[in-house]
Amino acid sequence: MTTYGPRRNDGPVILVVNACASRDLNDNVVGVCFVAQDMTTQKSMMDKFTRIEGDYKSIVLNPNPLIPPIFGADEFGWCSEWNPAMAKLTGWRREEVIDKILLGEVFGTNLACCRVKNQDIFVNLSVIINNAMTGHEIEKAQFSFFRRNGRLVECLLSVSKKVDREGVVTGVFCFLHIPSHELQQVLHVQKLSDQTTTKKLKALSYMRHAITNPLSGVMYSRKLMEGTNLSEEQKRFLNTAAKCHLQLNRILDDLDLDNIMDR
């Protein structure tokens, strides 16, 4: 109903009306009686949440590549969300995972749709989701799982609780942050560099062990010779050998590969 007077600018009033007949003493219908209940506030709230739900669907279910992979679960642990970006990333369609148990059937260690690398990752995911259900959310956590084609996905996971109008937790939303292709290339190169450095350090450790034993024998022989009757020239040779031995020990005690290369 349109409002007038002081409430003209407040917008229409929404009523729920029950109608019944008015009768006289002879039970003849003489009119109609209306009993109305003002539902303006409730209807406004419902319209607001309807708009929010529409906005949510337009964002979560949007195939735009800027929308990150999103999945979710209800308060009982069943998978309730799986947006197009998540389907593209994993290879599993929405209808294949919705209403499956998120921890076990969707993400798990054996026969799950998206198999995680090991039991530790599965336990960590369970803890993160359960903490989010109780309000202890984390900003980002490392997470990895295998796609449908067997390729490994390494990403960051953010989990947020989902609440209803009364503030009761009804589930969780999970967002995956996938590194860009350029960043993945940089990380790959860094990983290869680290592997190369590790191999060099192992080779260096072996060389150090192989040199130390003979060097200890040379030092022992030099100590024995210092107690004998030597000429001045022989003493100079022993002194030079002692200095060389000291320098070699400094190199062997320093496992910093860059410093060794500089020397």
Image (cartoon, grey):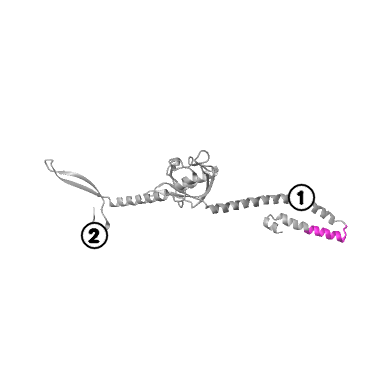
Asked whether 186 falls inside the magenta stretch, the response is: no
Residue 256 appears in view = no
Which one is in front, 210 or 24?
210
Residue 126 appears left or right of 27: right
Mark 1 falls on what kind of element? helix
In the displayed image of the protein, which residue is found farthest to the top? 111
Vertical order, 209 against 110 (above or below): below
Image location (x, y in percent) of residue 75: 42, 44
Q: Amino acid at mark 1?
A: Asn
**Discs 2, 1 touching: Cβ within 8 Å:** no
Q: Which residues are magenta?
A: 229-243
Q: Position of residue 70 (x, y in %)?
A: 45, 48
Determine which residue is flagged by label 1: 213
Residue at 72% across, 50% down: 207
**Residue 176 percent coordinates (x, y):** 49, 49
Reading the image, the residue beneath label 2 is: 6
Image position of 196 (left or right of 154): right
